[in-house]
Image: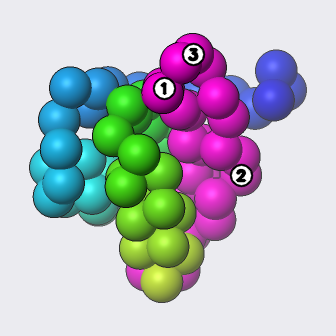
Amino acid sequence: MADVKIDKTLDVRGEVCPVPDVETRRALKSMKSGEVLEVLIDYPLSKERIPANVQKDGNEVIAIEDIGPSEWRILIRKK
């Protein structure tokens, strides 16, 4: 994913649901179409919930990557 330009990073590691999901949606609302949001999480349920909810809202999940033990990086393109 080195070719993807990150426009905004949201680090919600240490937070549990619903905070990562709510903060992700809030961040996407403030972004322009085509911009990419990087979300850093360490709560396993968020790895499932965030992609499902952002796709339901019409946005594109570019990637979900393991970045450490129980840590993930989700890349989302705002539509």
Where does label 1 land, which residue? 71
Q: Give me the disc on residue 68.
A: 3
Q: Hey, what amino acid is under mark 2? A: Ile
Residues shaded magenta: 57-79
For the residue labelled by badge 2, is the local secondary structure a helix, a strand or a loop?
A: strand
Residue 52 placement (x, y as % from top left) = 49, 73
Instruction: Report the residue at 48% width, 26% height from top.
Output: 71
Asked if residue 58 is among those painted magenta in the image, a careful observer would answer yes
Nearer to us: label 3 or label 2: 3
> What's the CA distance linking mark 1 and mark 2?
17 Å
For the residue labelled by badge 1, is the local secondary structure a helix, a strand or a loop?
A: strand
> What's the CA distance linking mark 3 and mark 1?
5 Å
Residue 23 placement (x, y as % from top left) = 21, 49
Count of picture labels: 3
Asked whether residue 32 is in view, the answer is no
27 or 15, which is in the foreground? 15
Instruction: Report the residue at 57% width, 51% height from top.
Output: 76
The reply, left or right, for residue 17 in relation to residue 42 is left
- Marked residue nearer the N-terminal end (1 or 2): 2
- Marked residue nearer the N-terminal end (3 or 2): 2
Contact flag, marks 3 and 1 (Cβ < 8 Å)? yes
> What's the CA distance linking mark 3 and mark 2?
19 Å
Instruction: Report the residue at 57% width, 16% height from top.
Output: 68
Q: Hey, what amino acid is under mark 1? A: Glu
Where does label 2 land, which residue? 62
Q: Hey, what amino acid is under mark 3? A: Gly
Mark 3 is surrounded, within 10 Å at the Cα level, by few (under 14), some (14 to 19) or many (20 or more) other residues, namely few
Residue 37 placement (x, y as % from top left) = 49, 41
Mark 2 is surrounded, within 10 Å at the Cα level, by few (under 14), some (14 to 19) or many (20 or more) other residues, namely some
